[in-house]
Amino acid sequence: MSRPQPPIAMLAELTHVCPLACPYCSNPMELTKKSDELDTATWARVFAQAADLGVLQLHLSGGEPAARRDLVELVKAARDAGLYTNLITSGVGLTEAKLTALDAAGLDHVQLSVQGITAALADRIGGYKGGFERKMHVAERIAEIGFPLTLNAVMHRHNLDDLPATIALAQRLGARRIEVACVQFHGWAEANRGQLQPTADQVHAAKATVEAERERLKGALVIDFVAPDWFSDFPKACMGGWGSTGLNITPAGDVLPCHAAESIPSLEFANITQASLSDIWYDDAAFNAFRGTDWMPPLCQSCDRRDIDFGGCRCQAMAIAGDAKATDPICRKSPDRAKVDALLNVAPSEAPFVYRGRV
Ligand code: SF4
Ligand code: FES
């Protein structure tokens, strides 16, 4: 296996604390306690190591990163290290004074999540009353300061029909980009599959909307759309291939090849307090577990899409086929594809959401 390229992007999950409790949260079911979070000096050291390794973009995420009292210091440390800084936030907890201080510290970009286009829906999904209104105030302040803004919308059965209005909201808030991602069934979302899974008709309609809106808004708004792959014949190249373009750091400092990697029980992850980021990226067993093609099942090894999708998503193979080394069950050639089709037939459930837990 040849030596991998350095990573381009790093996602720092600063904390699992969050005022919201979205039922599709990508955080693990077992959340990290505040007392186990990395401290300011350790994060600053990690940012410097990331820049030395070749990382260009730092995504500051959570939980809600604004729940960290030292957020401004962390942004400054990242900018001092030479990283492009992007804050991924629900907006709740970001005061006007904090935004001004983040601007002074050099924050480059803000990604604001929306849970719905009305207060009623957004607050129901986020499990936080008054969240939508506060978010709209924060969006106004973001526009006044002039941060480049991307709106993030996780979409599912309850809000996918609102896609045109969500795109209109992005424009109204002055966003330059909107990232629409259909819910991915890992962690908390998996516990809410019946409540969240959109219908095939909804997904097809959303694809048509995105195509038409991209044409209409060319030059004014960039629309990124991550469609679910469940209706496709082949999987996506998750993370651009395992351990090839980016890495995640958990609040406690474990270094992961993707956000859901902890769902693979056979892997153990190195902690940034015990090894350097460079050693982990190049030599850690978890990072090397699915690099290259040697790990692949014969089906993928002999396939002409082997270097296009890299066998798909390891976490999806784990979740659906029960084996992280299996061909991604989305693939029509996979012996496990019938399991995906069975999941697509899960009856829509009106049961209450299983909200993400609180730290
Ligand atoms: Fe991709 Fe493997 Fe399916 Fe080929 S067999 S399309 S490499 S998942
Ligand atoms: Fe982990 Fe796809 S989410 S490899």
Image (cartoon, grey):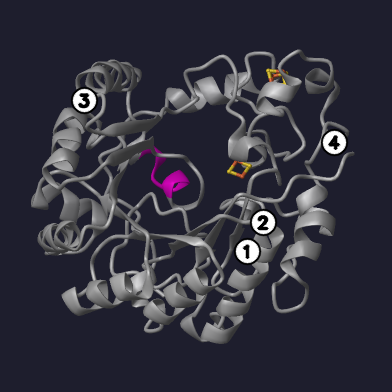
Q: Characterize the magenta stretch by its predominant secondary structure.
A: helix
Please state which of the two labelled residues, at mark 3 or mark 4, is closer to the viewer: 3
Q: Which residues are magenta?
A: 189-194
Quarter of the image where one finds residue 5: top right
Distance (Cα) linking label 1 and label 4: 30 Å
Quarter placement of the C terminus: bottom left
Please state which of the two labelled residues, at mark 4 or mark 2, is closer to the viewer: 2
Q: Earlier in the sequence, mark 1 or mark 3?
A: 1
Distance (Cα) linking label 1 and label 3: 35 Å
Q: Is residue 262 above or below residue 238?
A: below
Q: Which residue is mark 3?
A: 217
The disc labelled 3 sits on which kind of residue? Answer: Leu
Quarter placement of the N terminus: top right
Residue closer to the observer: 176 or 274: 176
The disc labelled 1 sits on which kind of residue? Answer: Ala
Residue 103: image location, x then y, percent: 29, 70
Q: Which residue is mark 4?
A: 295
The disc labelled 2 sits on which kind of residue? Answer: Gly
